[in-house]
Image: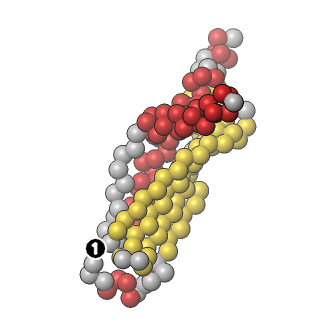
Amino acid sequence: MADQTAPVFQIQRVYLKDLSLEQPNSPGILLEQKQPNVDIQLAVAATTVAEGLYEVTITGTVHTKVEDKTLFLVEAKQAGIFEVRNIPEEQLGAVVGVACPQIVYPYLRGNIADVINRAGFPPVHMAEINFQAMYDQQQAQANAQQAPATTQ
């Protein structure tokens, strides 16, 4: 009986869900000698797959431009399926919103760097992310949006 109430956190699978690379202005733009501008965007999403199973997806977009022309655009979605059971409700959000992305993110970083390198460019090394700070910020924004509705 005690085993049925013990907290469970297990990685079921980590996988590359989607990956795309575009070089719309090649080969001409490859001859440019100007320094490119790199824009990196991240998004984290979680969905319930079944009771106690969650899919956590991190989408990373790297858009590199020379002036107003795209040098390359990479978008990757790295996902993981996690079994999370018997975790108190007030802690579940942090487990799914912090612990799971911390596990998935290194795979995303590696896949994006690899595809950029295979496309013939120096790899873009994405920085470490503080998912706790990101989660706290999202929670603060959600609370701020709910606060005006309750004071009316």
Residue 151 found in image quarter:
top right
Query: Can residue 14 be seen by looking at this rendering?
Result: no
Whether residue 92 is visible to the viewer of this picture, yes or no, is: yes
Vertical order, 91 against 47 (above or below): above
Looking at the image, is 94 positioned above or below residue 68?
above
Q: Residues within 10 Å of mark 1 (few under 14, many from 20)?
A: few
**Extreme top residue here?**
2
**Residue at left 39%, top 73%?**
65
Residue 60 in percent (x, y) is at 49, 56
Q: How is the image coloured?
A: secondary structure
In this orientation, which residue lies closer to the viewer: 119 or 1? 119
Count of marks, rendered view: 1
User: Quarter of the image containing the N terminus?
Assistant: top right
**In the rendered view, does 47 fall on the left or right side of 79?**
right
Point 48% across, 81% down: residue:
24
Which residue extends farthest front? Answer: 152
Residue 11 appears left or right of 134: right
* Percent x, y of residue 68: 41, 77
Amino acid type at image mark 1: Gln
Residue placed most toward the observer, 129 or 147: 147
Task: Name, please, the residue furthest toward the bottom.
Answer: 28
**Residue at coordinates 40% horizontally, 69% vertically from top-left?**
64
What residue is disc 1 on? 35
**Which quadrant is home to the C terminus?**
top right
Picture coordinates of residue 91, whole percent (x, y): 57, 24
Callout 1: SS: loop
Residue at screen point 69% across, 39% down:
48
Q: Is residue 59 above or below residue 134?
A: below
Dividing the picture into quadrants, the one containing residue 96 is top right
